Amino acid sequence: MVDFRLGEEQEALRTSVRDFAQEQVAPVIGEHYEHKTFPYDLVRQMGKMGLFGLPFPEEVGGMGGDYFALCIALEELARVDSSIAVTLEAGVSLGIMPIYRFGSPEQKDRWLPQLTSGEGLAAFGLTEPGSGSDAAAITTRAVLDESTGEWVINGAKAFITNSGTDITRLVTVMAATGTNPDGSKELSTIIVPAGTPGFSVAPGYSKVGWCASDTHELSFDDVRVPAANLLGARGRGFAQFLRILDEGRIAIAALSVGLAQGCVDESVKYAGERVAFGRPIGNYQAIQFMIADMELRAHTARLGYYDAAARMLAGEDFKRYAAIAKLNASNAAMENSRWATQVHGGYGFMNESPVGRFYRDAKILEVGEGTSEVQRMLIARGLGL
Ligand SMILES: Cc1cc2nc3c(=O)[nH]c(=O)nc-3n(C[C@H](O)[C@H](O)[C@H](O)COP(=O)(O)OP(=O)(O)OC[C@H]3O[C@@H](n4cnc5c(N)ncnc54)[C@H](O)[C@@H]3O)c2cc1C
């Protein structure tokens, strides 16, 4: 029989992340959200717990777990707060993973220990002001200066998570490095360390949600880095980013499920406490049905990401299933945040209420790491259309 229950170690991980989220994150995150401050102390604690190293082997400073372990942690964090969850998601699946998967032994030695320990953060620079879904349309360019043995990078990136914190160590930048024989752009990935001259970070965006996470526009003005900062082979940039995004969609699905489940948790609690017309509102079937539907969405979306992660870890082609998991889970998060806010009435519209934050944080899940339309394209493509 197929079994979707977690093993002992996975349950222990879930419990420890859940305790951390409830005891450490919940009491302080509203303040960070309100003032748009980055929760350095929580990130440091997550580093100590080993969360940034979850899916990496011990030789590179990791915890020896797998991608599914990361997803379990993301779900439990997002059940309480999404800013902290996306800081871990982007830090690991977008930040560290490209170096782990495609880096040279020297690049891994230099960067992985400080990243897997959570001491430093890495960011993923794909999106640009003029290109998101159509990632191949990027205009950032890198030219190899043969005389000095350096890449010279010019261009801009938009909406880059974890790119401007005090502990940001590097950004992996996708750039056009030439032209392929068929006339298309040759795309490659280059590591740009934080603080490299000519690399500037704009002030943080004013965002609708994820207000305690770090997001910036970046610009590159004749930025020079050694030729050895090329990540993997020249011309492989697009394939690398696609692989990273396919995996990342499972992680975003897990984060979405966490938000959807957080809506259930908060609604069940509130429905038992809030009295209207002489009875707790949880006695009314209209409220019960709203919450039952939320639980249905969270549970079925969870099965979707478990399945996609299992296929990925079995080494199968998981692209279509990652897209299904992300599309379905982000829908569940959106719907649940809408109904959880309804259950909470006016209190749900207040920023200090967790469901107010869930409502604001849900929308980006239908956009980041591939919009819902892009997921549908991938599913249709997987069906041969
Ligand atoms: C808070 C935040 C954090 C982010 N973090 C990162 C990060 O760390 N690194 C990074 O590289 N990027 C990051 N992004 C960027 C994110 O991945 C993009 O916003 C997303 O991929 C969509 O791209 P876009 O915003 O350019 O929208 P567009 O691609 O311009 O899309 C606009 C609309 O058109 C639709 N559309 C586009 N093409 C088609 C088509 N062919 N058919 C039908 N519909 C279509 C889209 O689905 C969407 O509805 C982040 C974004 C945000 C907001």
Image (spheres, helix red, strand yellow):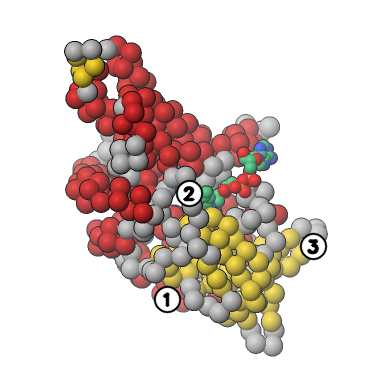
Q: Which residue appears at 41% of the width and 65% of the height?
A: 165
Q: In the rendered structure, which amino acid carries the disc numbered 2?
A: Lys
Q: Is residue 358 left or right of residue 274?
A: right
Residue 286 is situated, as x and y percent measured from the top left of the image, at 33, 13
Q: Of the numbered discs in the image, which one, if any, rests on residue 64?
A: none
* Residue wearing tag 1: 110
The mark lying in front, picked from 3 and 2, is: 2
* Residue wearing tag 3: 181
Tell me the quarter of the picture where residue 356 sits: top left
The mark lying in front, picked from 1 and 2, is: 2
Tell me the quarter of the picture where residue 254 sits: top left
Residue 123 is situated, as x and y percent measured from the top left of the image, at 48, 62
Tell me the quarter of the picture where residue 268 sits: top left
Q: Which of the pair 163/113 is nearer the observer?
A: 163
The quarter of the image holding the C terminus is: top right
Q: In the rendered structure, which amino acid carries the disc numbered 1?
A: Arg
Structural distance between the alpha carbons of marks 1 and 3: 34 Å
Structural distance between the alpha carbons of marks 1 and 2: 33 Å
Q: Is residue 6 left or right of residue 112?
A: left
Q: Which residue appears at 70% of the width and 54% of the height?
A: 137
Q: Which residue appears at 56% of the width and 73% of the height?
A: 199
Residue 300 is situated, as x and y percent measured from the top left of the image, at 39, 27
Q: In the rendered structure, which amino acid carries the disc numbered 3?
A: Pro
